Structure formats: C-alpha cells, structure tokens
Image (tube, rainbow, N blue to C red):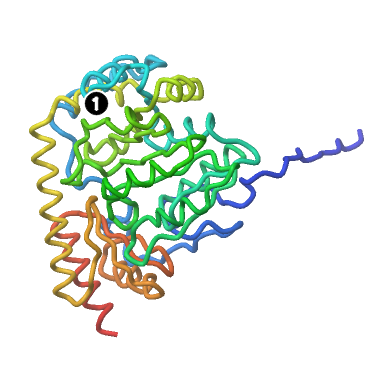
Amino acid sequence: MTARQVTQPSFRTSELDRFSAYRATEGREPTEGREAPEATEPGTAEDVLDLSNNELMLPPLPAVVDSLRRSSLQVNLYPDPTARVLKTTLARHFGAETEETVVGPGSGGVLQQLLLVLAGRGDEVLHAWPGFDAYPLLVAVTGAKGVPVPLTTTGEHDLTGLLERVNPRTRAVILCSPHNPTGRRIPRSALLGFLDSLPSHVVAILDQAYMEFDEEEDPHDLGLIREYPNVVLLRTFSKAYGLAGLRVGYAFASSEIAVRARKTVIPFSVTRSGERAAVISLAQGSDLAERLGTVRRMRADLRSDLGAQGLVPLPSSANFVWLPLGPESDRFAAAALRAGVRVRSYSGDGVRISVGTEEAHRRVLIAAKDFLSV
C-alpha cells in the first residue's frame, strides 16, 4: 500500500500574520512575529505575588460568592444565549434602553463584536500606544489595519495626532480612559473637542474598563451616546467588580450599532454564573463604593511611597500606577521578580504596577530600593 500524500491547508494572507497570540505578559509594541521572552523567576510560582494584570486585590463580594455556589450546581445547563436578564438589568441600572445595550464575554469580547461590524479588509482602526495589547490583535481579526498613535510624553492620548491620522479608510478609533497602562484620564472638555472634530463616518469606542476608579467620572452618565451617535461606551465587570475570571463585559451605543454588534456574539458566551454574578454585583452599591475607596487609598499610598524612594509615578485614575522608566523598564521588572512580585514592563516605555496587598506593595518598595541602588 502506498503512503498517502499529506498536504498542508493553505491560509490566505491577513493582518493576523503580523502578530503572535495574545499573552497578558507581553506589553510590547505590536511588531511582526515577535514572541516575548519568558521571565526567569526565583523560587516557585507561589512565591511570586502578581501585580501585572490589573486584577482587583479583594475577593468577590459575599453575595456574589453565594450566587456562585448556587450556580455551580447548574453547569450542565446552557446559559441564556442573549443574557437577557443581565442586559435588561444593565439598561435599567444605568438608564439606557435595552436596544442600546450589548453584553459579551468581557470587554475584550464585546470590543471584538463591535469591530467585526465596524471594520474589515482595507479599513483602518486607530488606537493609542502603548495600550491594551489586545487592541491590535482584535483589529487584525477583522482584516482591518490597526494604526497605533504614540502617547504624549506625559502618558496621555495625543488627540491631535489621532485626528491627523483619520482618513476615508478609518472606521473606528479606540480611546481608553483611564488609559491602560498609564492611568491617565481624558478630560471631558478635551474629549468633547475631539468628538466634535471627528468625522461622522468614524466610530469612537471609549474603553471605560477602569472608570469606576476615577473619582471624576459618573458611570450613570450616558450623555455621550445621546449627543454623539458615533460613540460607544465599553465597560467590564472584570476590574472594579472583581469578576475577571467570569468574563462579563458590556457596552452602550446607539441602537443601530448595538443591534449589529449583538449579531456577532458567540452563542452562550456569557455563562450562567457570570450573568448572575454581574446582576447581583450591580445591587451592591455601598459595598462597591467602600472597595473603590480602599483601592484609591492604596493607590495613593503606593504612589507616595514610590515617590519617597526617588521614583516618580504618573498621577493615576485607575487601579494601577505607571512608572515612565523608558529603557530602564525591564531592569525594574527584573528587580521586582527578585523581590518576589511580578509587575508589567512595557519595554522602552515604562512599568505598570497594579494596586495590590500591603505585602505586595512592600515587595515593590524593596524592588525600588534594589533598582535605585545600581
């Protein structure tokens, strides 16, 4: 019997060829085919405290824990494919219409739904850089080209630079406020000026994943989507609500955009446990406010303590701080690992440190001392 000839499937060339699969520890300029090196860590994985992913340091709220116990007994059942209860609860809680509400598996999942209906081959999507590593990858999934626009020297969006890059091929621009990884917020006056200058054919996706940590923002203010039909407000339960492991995100947009985005959702992608936990979380207003206060206090303490060591973090409106260390960023991250804590280095730009426990912060300060002693 002759051997069967095996042929490999052929793949069409696409923007995806420029990127590796998403890895939360990369934090690098999106360049073609580059893999991030593995870090060498002391001791076992359990010895290292992780402040690299902007996770909430606090455990789930008690009411959420009880919900998870009950919903775990129903994992044999499919969830509601439309997450109807969550969608209607979100609309009621924030004063939106259900037709203006989109839900999905985390804000990253909702962003992909939006991009799939907004952009395609030959189109462009603008975003600030450095930024959330998933932005360029999710844009590439649509076949469109991501166009990174450098942040200002103070870690803020270069709104003028973004507007200068808009052209007839531009379908969307992603703004993140507070910005990941610098923690800088876009002032409302600057944002309104940008939106007034943005052509109507371009959709502005405002990523508000960290907005609850910003004392200047009101999550119930949906005025932007009322005044600007080409604006989307993208949010998540992963950060302030502490449900990162359950993957629940949502967005508010004009009904025209929202109806299309709901068609691209992966069926059953919001789990029963995630939906119930999110609905319950919305009712825990006082507990949430207390937790936000704790994070803000610890953020201020971390920034102050690093400043006392001789480092200068940028003012932050998120649950992390940013050290603009430029070419010294990787060296600081290595010092942090030696001290038993993992932080996020954006090589050549800076280091992002999530607000964590007192012990984790103690190790960060040890790392800072080690870093500055050289």
The x, y position of residue 203, in whole percent, is 46, 36
The x, y position of residue 189, in whole percent, is 27, 47
Q: Nearer the viewer, residue 188 or 87?
A: 188
Q: Nearer the viewer, residue 278 or 49?
A: 278
Position of 299 relative to 258 (above/below): below
Position of 273 relative to 152 (above/below): above
Within the image, what quadrant is residue 245 found in? top left
Q: Which residue is mark 1?
A: 277
Residue farthest to the right? Answer: 2
Query: Is the C terminus in the top left, top right, bottom left or bottom right quadrant?
Result: bottom left
State the residue at coordinates (28%, 62%): 322
State the residue at coordinates (32%, 68%): 324
The x, y position of residue 356, in whole percent, is 20, 54
Within the image, what quadrant is residue 62 found in? top left
Residue type indicated by callout 1: Ala
State the residue at coordinates (25%, 80%): 372
Label 1: element kind: helix
State the residue at coordinates (57%, 39%): 141
